[in-house]
Amino acid sequence: MAGPERFAELARQFSAFGAVKRELGRALPHDCPPGSTAVLTLLGRHGEMRMSRLAELLAVDMSVTSRQVAHLAERGWIDRSPDPADKRSRILRLTPAGEAKLQQIFESTTRMLSDRLGDWSENDIDELIRLLTRLRARFGDCRSPHPPHTSEPTPVHPHK
């Protein structure tokens, strides 16, 4: 097991990782901030769902989810329709325009990662994916299609 000094260094690296997230955020289209991108990504990965499920996957309050959904619906990227099982609930799904926006986001992010990590070996990239997937699973990321504490990699593409 690693000693406390290694975990302290890891904590410093996590703190510095904000710069990576900010740079990735700059690759997003100006009309689709990170919160909206997360909604599109989850709908692309999981398919249609109720707003309550989306809030759970985002790990945010329903009021935050409602604002993000409204932003996306105004742009025509998602559709909100009554849930046939419960008319008080809404089912959210990507529209063709939303699928196109998600593809644009995916291509832009992929280009940025390719630019920044293009000199890394395929093995290095695979190892980073494996370790990040494992780390995310340890923290119980409910967005992952795998149960906690697995080390199976999550496919890296926009719709699954």
Image (spheres, rainbow, N blue to C red):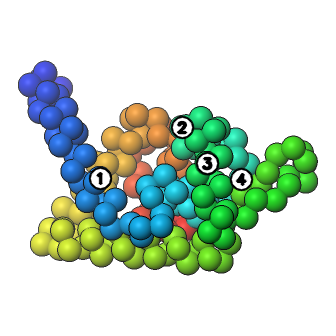
Residue appearing at x 55%, y 78% in the figure: 100
The amino acid type, in three-letter code, at marker 1 is Lys
Residue 21's tag is: 1
**Closer to viewer: mark 4 or mark 1:** 1
Q: What numbered label is drawn on residue 59?
A: 2
Which mark's residue is nearer the viewer, 3 or 1?
Answer: 3
Q: Position of residue 133 (x, y in %)?
A: 37, 49
Q: Which is more N-terminal, label 2 or label 1?
A: 1
- In terms of sequence position, does the residue under pointer 3 or pointer 1 come before the other? 1
Query: Residue 110's spot in the image, x, y percent?
Result: 33, 72
Which of the 4 image quarters holds residue 80?
bottom right
Earlier in the chain: of badge 2 and badge 3, it is 2
Pointer 4 residue:
49
Task: Measure the C-alpha gap from mark 3 to mark 1.
Answer: 22 Å
Labels 4 and 2 touching (C-beta < 8 A): no
Q: Is residue 59 above or below residue 104?
A: above
Q: CA distance from mark 4 to mark 1?
A: 27 Å
Give the x, y percent position of residue 160.
54, 64
- Callout 3: helix, strand or loop? helix
Quarter of the image where the N terminus is located? top left
Nearest the eye: 144 or 90:
90
- Circle 3 residue: 67
Seen in the picture, residue 31 relative to 20 is either above or below; the reply is below
Mark 1, residues whose alpha carbon is within 10 Å: few (<14), some, or many (≥20)?
A: few
Looking at the image, residue 67 sits to the left or right of residue 120; the answer is right
